[in-house]
Image: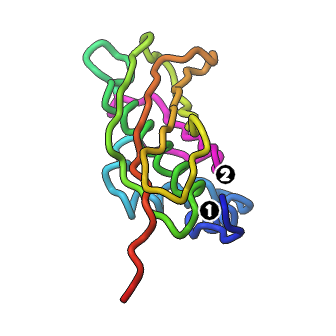
Amino acid sequence: MSKSVTPPVLKAYQALSRRPLGKFIFSRGLCLKAPYFSSIKPLISELRPAYCEVQMSKRRAVQNHIGTVHAIAMCNMAELSGGLMTDVTIPTTHRWIPKGMTVEYLKKANTNLKAIAQPEATPDWSVAQDYWVKVEVQDTAGEIVFRARIAMWVSPKKSAG
């Protein structure tokens, strides 16, 4: 981050994650703000600038007809982890929105999953541009079962007035 201002989402995560059940409470609160993500019941297990880790349990609601975690559940993990990582990484003077995502399904997702989002590079924040995020989803053996590349459009916030 170019400024020392801590993003509000990161402040909340840091405050709650130190408490018992804090990561769980933060994750559920996030799902109240963005209800669509509640379908995967995520747990934000780590969040810091340039890094986000989201966990999801394999349960019936996220399984497909062959008993593996379905593609859209993994896409949700990717968008959630990529968006959170972007939110706590870009300067607080900027805003972002997902612009596009490409995905690869590499093997069957037969276990609980962990998504790790990181930036591909550190851009020049002085211009509006695509900010590329890579997300890898691993099974409990550490095997990558899914990979995503997300273009986040990052631009300076409009000034009030």
Residue at figure coordinates x 46%, y 16% from the top left: 110
Between 57 and 101, the one nearer to me in the picture: 101
Residue at figure coordinates x 48%, y 17% from the top left: 145
Give the distance between the C-alpha atoms of the residues marked 1 and 2, in whole angstroms. 7 Å
Check disc 1 and report the residue beneath it. Answer: 10
Q: Which residues are magenta?
A: 41-62
Q: Amino acid at mark 2?
A: Arg
For the residues bearing labels 1 and 2, Cβ distance under 8 angstroms: yes
Disc 1 secondary structure class:
helix
Q: Position of residue 45 (x, y in %)?
A: 63, 45
Between 21 and 104, the one nearer to me in the picture: 104
Q: Amino acid at mark 1?
A: Leu
Disc 2 secondary structure class:
strand
Q: Is residue 69 magenta?
A: no
Q: Quadrant of the N terminus?
A: bottom right
Residue 77, label in figure: none
Residue farthest to the left, as pictured: 65
Check disc 2 and report the residue beneath it. Answer: 48
